Amino acid sequence: MSRVDEIKKMLKTDPKDSFLTYALALEYEKAEKPKEAIKIIEGLIQHDPNYLGAYYKLGQLYEAQDKLTKAQKIYSTGIKLATEKQDNKAKGELEEALWLIEEE
């Protein structure tokens, strides 16, 4: 059984588990299926907009697809959330990612 299958099986018992959903997206990214990973993380943010790590990963996935405007928007949204949560580490990572896009 693949890791994707294992995670999907676990998600059947708790479909709204944000950590497992995020883990599933990472597995799709590793399997070089970025569109699936993007779809999963977009859904994760819709159902759990406070899952801060999703913003950085989604921004990276958008960048890899050359969707820089979408990446900028998602990084900016993540920065606002990190500020609200007083998570300076995440805020700094998101700000750096946004800055690197703007420098291109």
Image (cartoon, rainbow, N blue to C red):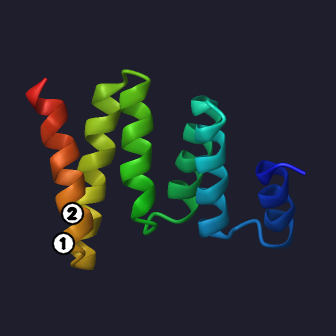
Q: Please name the amino acid that badge 1 sits on.
A: Asn
For the point 84% across and 51% down, the residue is 5
Q: Quadrant of residue 15?
A: bottom right
What SS does tag 2 mark? helix
Q: How many marks?
A: 2
Residue under label 1, please give it. 88
Residue 11 appears left or right of 32? right
Q: Residue at x 28, y 47 (%)?
A: 75
Q: Is residue 35 above or below residue 59?
A: above
Give the percent coordinates (x, y) of residue 53: 42, 61
Front position in the image: 4 or 82: 4
Q: Secondary structure at mark 1?
A: helix
Position in image of residue 1 (x %, y %):
90, 51
Q: Measured along the vertical axis of the image, is residue 98 above or below residue 88?
A: above
Task: Using a 10 Å C-alpha cutoff, classify the residue at mark 1 as few (fewer than 14 neighbours), some (14 to 19) or many (20 or more).
Answer: few
Residue 3 location in percent, x, y? 77, 53
Residue farthest to the left, as pictured: 103
Which residue in the rendered view is the most extreme toward the right?
A: 1
Residue at numbered disc 2: 91
